[in-house]
Amino acid sequence: MLGYTLRQLEYFVAVGETGSIAAASEKVNVSSPSISAAIAHLEAVFGLPLFVRQHAQGLSLTSGGRRMLEQARTVLREADALMDLSGDISGLVRGPLAVGCLLTFAQVVLPPVRRSFQDAYPEVRVEQHELNQADIFSFLRRAEIDVALTYDLDLPADLTFEPLIELPPYAIVAEDHVLADRKTVAVEDLLGLPMVLLDLPFSAEYFLSFFTRIGAKPVIAERTRDMAVMRGLVANGFGYSLANVRLPSDVSPDGKPLKFIPLEGDARPMRLGLLMAEGAGSASVVRAFVEHCKARVTPDHLPGVKI
């Protein structure tokens, strides 16, 4: 019989990754004394120190602790795979699911999709990560997430994309902007006007490609990586912006009105879909999430977003 539990290994990995009992406690939502006790128990069972205690700098893994950490991660992954296999055999969907979501719509799309999924599959434990596109690629390749809701932006060949819907681009302007009364705008109409660029990896290149296509450059007055900050800057007259997601309320975080104007011409829409590593869809919990998203995200309905 083992002298330790998978839960104790989970606490060990959390401390090893955060370097702090307090941070690990927050990460796994367990009291600090419980984690300290688990680490002490593992050190006694294994007969070796896992960490060096440094009063001012937290905990550092010993050389043996680093090797044990890698093995503990492997054991936990294999335990998750065993749970998933049992779900395949029994027909039940259960176990852990790590879901990534692109920062630009994580605040509105993922929470309702996750809520309805967990209501349908209460034995699934969902962990969510809000990421930019570059980090989504890295997290999928390192198996830190199982699947991600994202756009088809510069997708690498080693990852699999399952499209859900297309989202056309909008120009976003303040209520008193010179273009505010237009029904549609062309990229040419934006030339010479100050722009607030949503400056996220791959997203920025997508928006700037509209101008490159016509041999022009926008006048970038402001850059931000935060969707809410972008909306605030636009509403307060610092420039227009471009986006593919329209929130249910056309107001900025400080309550000022915004106008969303469809971009005319041949600017390609974003395709929203699910990105996975090769073979990830064979896991029952991932398959269930994919099918749930296909049912919930349709051309007529995207949770939390105006279509």
Image: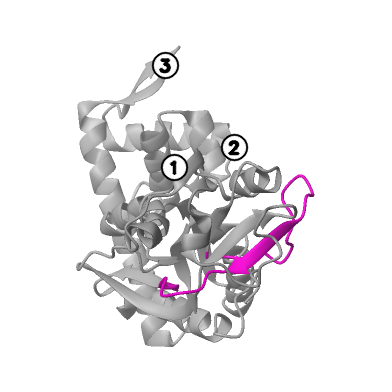
Nearest to viewer (mark 2 / mark 3) = 3
Callout 1 amino acid: Tyr
Residue 80 rendering spot, x and y as whole percentages = 37, 64
Q: Which mark is residue 244?
A: none
Q: Is residue 144 visible?
A: no
Query: Helix or strand or loop: what does disc 3 sit on?
Result: loop
Residue at 35% over, 47% down? 3
Q: Nearer the viewer, mark 3 or mark 1?
A: 3
Looking at the picture, how far across and down is residue 215, in whole percent? 32, 58
Q: Which residue is mark 3?
A: 57
Residue 262 forms part of the magenta stretch: yes
Looking at marks 2 and 1 on the same chain, the residue that comes earlier in the sequence is marked by: 1
Kindly report the distance in space between the C-alpha atoms of the residues bearing marks 2 and 3: 20 Å
Cα distance in 3D space between marks 3 and 1: 19 Å
| Most common SS among magenta residues | loop
Callout 3–callout 1 Cβ contact below 8 Å = no
Residue on which the image places disc 2: 31
Residue type (three-letter) at the residue carrying disc 2: Ser
- Residue most toward the top? 56
* Quadrant holding the C terminus: bottom right
Residue at image point 45% right, 38% down: 38
Q: Could one spot residue 255 in this view of the protein?
A: yes
Label 2: element kind = loop
For the record, the magenta segment spans 244-272
Q: Which residue is painted at 58% across and 44% down in the image?
A: 29
Q: CA distance from mark 2 to mark 1?
A: 11 Å
Of the numbered discs 2 and 3, the one sitting upstream in the chain is 2
Sequence-first tag of 3 and 1: 1
List the residue tagged with mark 1: 11
Residue 21 x, y percent position in the rendering? 49, 30
Crowding near the residue tagged with mark 2, few <14, some 14–19, many ≥20 C-alpha atoms within 10 Å? few
- Verify CB contact (< 8 Å) between mark 2 and mark 3: no
